[in-house]
Every structure is written in C-alpha cells, then in structure tokens.
Amino acid sequence: SYVLTQPPSVSVAPGKAARITCAGNSLGTQAVHWYQQKPGQAPVLVVYADSDRPSGIPERFSGSNSGNTATLIISRVEAGDEADYYCQVWDSSISWVFGGGTKLTVL
Amino acid sequence: VQLVESGGGLVQPGTSLGLSCAASGFSFSDYGMFWVRQAPGRGLEWVAVIWYDGSNKYYADSVKGRFTISRDNSKSTVDLQMSGLRAEDTAVYYCARGHSDSWPNYLDFWGQGTLVTVSS
C-alpha cells in the first residue's frame, strides 16, 4: 500500500514561514490534500489539489508538489496556526491514504 | 454544512456497534461520504467510503469484512455498522463529506466525531 511520510514535528517563530513536507513515491504525479487539526477539534481542509485553497482559508496557506515531495507552506505564521497537519492522497489501489501527521509548534 | 455523528460508546471486544451521521446544509444525495477514525494520540485513518447513490462502497483492509457503510438519502444519513470489534478499533470516528459524488479525491467537511472504546 502507498505510504506518505511526514516529519513528526516542525517549529517556527511567529511571522516566519513554516514548511511541512510530505514524501511519497512519485507523489508529484498525484493530487495532494492537506488538513489542519487543532487539539480536540475535527480536521479542516486547508489545501486541496496540491495548491488550491477552500473558501475561508487564508492566503497564507499554500502548497506545492513535485517529484516525490509535496510541501504545505504557511507564511507569516501566527500562534493560532499551531496544530497537527496531515497530507492525504487517493491511491489507485482504491484507498485514501493519510500521512502520519506533523505537529507545528509556534515558538 | 453540518455533520453530526452519534452512537459511540464503550463496548466489549467481539461485539457490534452502529454509528450514524446526520447531514444538513447541503444536497446530501450529490456527495460521496466517508468514515475516518483516529486512535488516541494517533493520526487519521480512512475507514470506509460510499458513493453518492450507494452504488459503490470501499473499505480499509483493517476493517474489511467487519464494518459496513450504508446511507439513506431520504434521511440524509450515513451509517457505519461495526462488528467483531477489537481493542485496536478504539478511536474517534469522524464522518466526512467527499468533494464529489463519486471517486471523491478529498474530504471537504468533517463532523466533530464520536468516540468508540472497545474494552473488557
């Protein structure tokens, strides 16, 4: 089955940019989606199809995907961005795969 | 869009439990629906998906043969019937909307989840 690998944690100072990676075999050939989950809350879709933002998601959230790595970029990080972030793809083996998640800490 | 799960609780290993998700605020019959779970302190795991019209259903290998997803478009509900429950099924179970009617690539709205605890 397809595997998505994320770093367990990323730390960033307020106002700086955070980059959260998601690695998978030939990931650049697939559409990658990202979810934000704050403690005790349900996940929220923040980026879909590599780099598109749902309505209501700040422009500070963006994404890219090439080769074997997709990246969620959060510019001008705020304290309220502290959360777990998950990447996800649909795999042709007919399964929906999530990465293990990355905990973003705002210093 | 609102998704409200119900039916969670404490059950013994080997028993059965049914979860339900009530949807509102959108045309329910136009969207595929998911169940996704999250074990305590762990990441997200896709469990099952059902097409907008119930014509196709897919399951994660970890629950195949034990869990059954179904929907009632007249009531805007999607259910998950779980049998042969194991300790490793302990998790918060989320209902989520797929972004399209079939082959939903991603999940665009999620409910708040319901906790299932399997323990003797």
Image (cartoon, coloured by chain):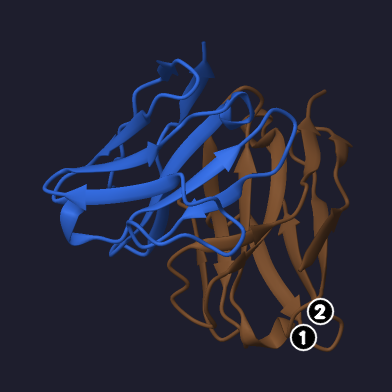
Tell me if I can see residue B16 in this picture.
yes
**Looking at the picture, how far across and down is residue A104, in whole percent?**
49, 23
Q: For chain A, give the colour.
A: blue
| Chain letter for mark 2 | B
Could you tell me how many numbered marks the image carries? 2
Horizontal side of residue B50 vs B94, given as left or right: left
For marks 1 and 2, give the CA distance.
Answer: 5 Å
Q: Is residue B16 above or below residue A16?
A: below
Mark 1 burial class by Cα count in 10 Å: few <14, some 14-19, many 20+: some
Q: Residues within 10 Å of mark 2 (few under 14, many from 20)?
A: some
Based on the displayed image, in which of its 4 quarters is residue A80 positioned?
top right
Q: Secondary structure at mark 1?
A: loop
| Labels 1 and 2 touching (C-beta < 8 A) | yes
Residue nearer the viewer, B35 or A69: A69
Q: Which residue is mark 1?
A: B73
Residue named by callout 2: B76
Residue A10: x and y in percent read: 40, 19
- Does residue A3 appear left or right of residue B111 in this picture? left
Q: Which chain is brown?
A: B
